[in-house]
Amino acid sequence: MNLLTNKIFLAIIVAGIFAQLLKIIIFKFKHKQKFHINDLIVTGSMPSSHSALVISLVIIIGLTEGLTTTFFLSAVFAVIVIRDAFGVRRTAGEEGKIIDKIIKASKLKIKTYHYSLGHKPSEVIVGTVIGIISALLVYFL
């Protein structure tokens, strides 16, 4: 099957591109910075690209194949990814920010990093909506 006509592949690609572009636009307006190539793979912040990808996968599989084993496997996979996005990864990002503050306060000569690994629930919800819309657009167009 040609990837360019594969609805599952297209739904995931559309969701990922839309979520990441929206993330870059929001980030640039919020922080007033110029675009950098690394912005294409930035993690965390609004919206959750991970949520958009896995939800588009679940929805498009449900639409194209019905309630099959593949649908339920993708749903379990989505729950794990989303839980990780606003659970474990968010905690790691918050701890990273605290470590940066400690380094700056102690005036150590250690490079600090931008920490925004995880997501707030609102970021996951927006990513989920993007995933649903992307899957529906690909399926019905």
Image: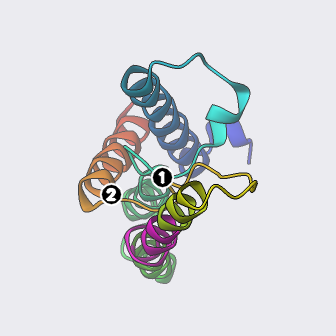
In the rendered structure, the answer to whether residue 46 lies left or right of residue 34 reads left
**44 in magenta:** no
Q: Which residue is mark 1?
A: 44
x and y percentages locating residue 108 in the rendered image: 70, 58
Q: Magenta stretch: give its range.
A: 83-95
User: At numbered mark 1, what does the secondary structure look like: helix, strand or loop?
Assistant: loop
Residue located 49% across and 81% down the image: 73
Q: Secondary structure at mark 2?
A: helix
Mark-to-mark CA distance, 1 and 2: 10 Å
Q: Is 87 or 62 nearer to us in this picture? A: 87
Disc 2 designates what residue?
124
Indicate the position of residue 48 as horizontal and vertical percent values: 42, 51
Q: Could you say which quadrant of the image residue 35 lies in?
A: top right
Residue at figure coordinates x 37%, y 43% from the top left: 46
Q: Magenta: predominant secondary structure element?
A: helix
Q: What's the residue type where badge 1 is placed? A: Gly
* Residue 94 shown in magenta: yes
Q: Amino acid at mark 2?
A: Val
Hey, which quadrant is residue 79 in on the image?
bottom left
Lower sequence index among marks 1 and 2: 1
Image location of residue 112, percent across then percent down:
66, 52
**Relative image position of residue 107 (x, y in whole percent):** 63, 55
What residue is rendered at 74% in x and 48% in y? 1
Q: Which disc is residue 123 wearing? A: none
Is the residue under label 2 in contact with that under label 1 (CB below 8 Å)? no
Which quadrant holds the C terminus? top left
Image position of 69 with respect to 15: above or below: below
